[in-house]
Amino acid sequence: MRKCVFFIVCLIAFSPHIKAQERKVVVQLMPFSIQGLGSDEAKILEALIQSYIIDLGNSVNYETITDDANFQAESQNPDYIITGSIARVGDERVLKLDLVNTQTGEVEHFTSNHKTASDLALKSRSLVQEALFGGNETSSSAETAEAISRDAVAGTWKGDTGIEMIRLQRNGTGMAVFSSGVRMMLSYSIDRDTITVTQTSPNVERFYHPVPLTVAKALVQTAEPMTWEMKLYNNGTDLKGTKKATAVEYEGDTVKAFYFGTMREAEWTRIN
């Protein structure tokens, strides 16, 4: 029998949706239903949303269990059950979250539509907060993005994972310096409040440090250009959004699979 993974999330209730109680309430997070999305895109979006549900608040703990675990134990009986789905409907990605009160049977419904997977990924944390905790998000993801221009982004930025520094020029070009020492040339465009930064230089092995050399060489031949979609926050000091790149699954020196269009959160901080 195929085993499904569940998450048991213990939360201090503090919202109009999850009613205030003196003890911790137990929330059971079920696997998401995915329709019409590529497997890579679906995995990333589902993992992001589930991680935000788990991470909300300072008193969050969770444990994984399988479908043959003893759910009858009093300590694991959930007060609430969260079910979710992500579906592609036409050109949009639709996120749905349902919060079921197991004591009363009451169900809270939440739906959000997005033109792109990147937009859904970027807003996923604030969406989870709005859906489950009444919109009291205090993190930067709930902040209003600021006006963006070439003058606003020109300068030097501290990079995200694997990148030491990014330099953006007013002429729409830039350069990233990786932790491995190699440089990547960039171009960027601005559409309303979003900057899209794109790799323009050819792939080289050191873009993918510290993977084994044979795997890095395979990525050089196969990987798509890296791109970042970001918005400006905190009086022009932070660029926050998503990075899209090609991920690789490997064992030893053997490539098992490539995953194109893999997204994760990214943040750059202005140096000068």
Image: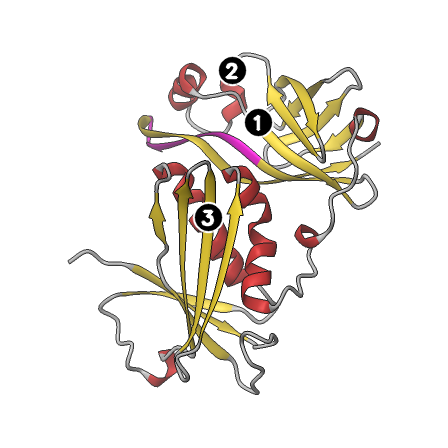
Amino acid type shown at disc 1 = Thr
- Which of disc 1 and disc 3 is earlier in sequence? 3
Give yes or no for residue 45 being in the magenta stretch.
no
Assign a secondary structure to mark 2.
Answer: loop
Amino acid type shown at disc 2 = Val
What whole-number distance in Å separates the C-alpha atoms at marks 1 and 2? 16 Å
* Quarter of the figure that contains the C terminus: top right
Give yes or no for residue 247 being in the magenta stretch.
yes
Q: Which residue is mark 2?
A: 204
Discs 3/1, front? 3
- Mark 2, Cα crowd under 10 Å, few <14 / some 14-19 / many 20+, is some
What whole-number distance in Å separates the C-alpha atoms at marks 3 and 1? 23 Å
Assign a secondary structure to mark 1.
Answer: strand
Residue 106 to residue 39: above or below:
below
Can you tell which quarter of the image residue 172 is in?
top right
Q: Which percent across, then down, holds residue 195?
A: 68, 30
Assign a secondary structure to mark 3.
Answer: strand
Horizontally, residue 102 falls left or right of residue 11, namely left
* Quarter of the figure that contains the N terminus: bottom left
Horizontally, residue 244 falls left or right of residue 191, namely left
Q: Which percent across, then down, holds residue 225?
A: 52, 20
Q: Which residue is mark 3?
A: 94
Q: Which percent across, then down, holds residue 30?
A: 36, 63
Can you tell which quarter of the image residue 271 is in?
top right
Tag on residue 227? 1
- Mark 3, Cα crowd under 10 Å, few <14 / some 14-19 / many 20+, is many
Q: Which percent across, then down, holds residue 102?
A: 39, 79
Discs 3/2, front? 3
Amino acid type shown at disc 3 = Val
